[in-house]
Every structure is written in C-alpha cells, then in structure tokens.
Amino acid sequence: MYYRIHLYRSFIGLPETIRQTCRALGLRKRGAVIYREVNPQMVGQILKIKEIVKVNLVKDLATRDAELMSRKSSPGFTVERRVL
C-alpha cells in the first residue's frame, strides 16, 4: 500500500517547518505527485502539511506515463475517418 501525495497549493508564505517537511517528502513544486509507503512516519509528516496536499491510498505505484494520462483531459471530439 502506498500514499499518493499531491501538492495542490504552494507553500509560499507558510512557516519554515512546513516548507522543510514538503522538501523532505520530495515535494518541490505545486502540482507535484509522489508515492510513499504507508508507515507511521509518513502519517506524521502528512498531518503536518494536510492543508496543502491531497492524499489517496493506492495499492500499487503508477508509472510516470500513467500518471500523465490520468490527468489528461479528453479533447471533446472523436475522429471518425481521415479525409485526404
């Protein structure tokens, strides 16, 4: 089991301890997604930054390509055939 941690708010203007916690987890930029194993130390760090992250519990790790495809929106149309 893994935590999927998504930094959805910036930590600019927040206390230094929260910035250090984000950096220790590996969250550098807004929008970053990381996966960490479930353990008590992670729970403590996540609770410290709970206001600026979204956390999901997942069974296995997603590859970078799968992560990008999950965030990609649909184009709003489908190509039925190509006209040349």
Image: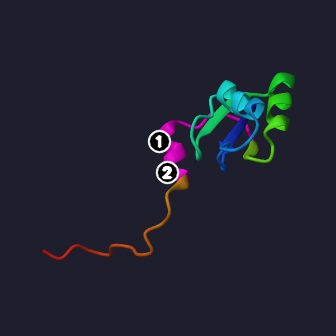
Q: Which picture quadrant has residue 38?
A: top right
Q: Which picture quadrant has residue 75?
A: bottom left
- Identified at 74% across, 47% down, the residue is 52
* Kind of residue sitting beneath label 2: Met
**Does the CB distance between marks 1 and 2 fall below 8 Å?**
yes
State left or right for residue 67 relative to residue 54: left
Q: Position of residue 44 (x, y in %)?
A: 86, 29
Q: Position of residue 64 (x, y in %)?
A: 50, 38
* Kind of residue sitting beneath label 1: Asp
Disc 2 on helix, strand or loop?
A: helix
Magenta stretch holds residue 68? yes
Name above or below for residue 65 compared with residue 36: below
Q: Which picture quadrant has residue 25?
A: top right
Q: Quadrant of the C terminus?
A: bottom left
As drawn, the label of residue 69 is 2
Q: Residues within 10 Å of mark 1 (few under 14, many from 20)?
A: few
- Identified at 58% across, 38% down, the residue is 62
Q: Residues within 10 Å of mark 2 (few under 14, many from 20)?
A: few
* Label 1 sits on residue: 65
- Identified at 55% across, 52% down, the residue is 70
Q: Position of residue 55 (x, y in %)?
A: 75, 44
Please name whichever residue, 59 or 14, is drawn nearer the observer in this view of the structure. Answer: 14
Query: Magenta residues, as a range?
Result: 57-70
As drawn, the label of residue 2 is none
- Identified at 50% across, 47% down, the residue is 68
State left or right for residue 52 relative to residue 61: right
Q: Quadrant of the N terminus?
A: top right
Alpha carbons under labels 1 and 2: distance apart: 6 Å
State left or right for residue 81 relative to residue 57: left
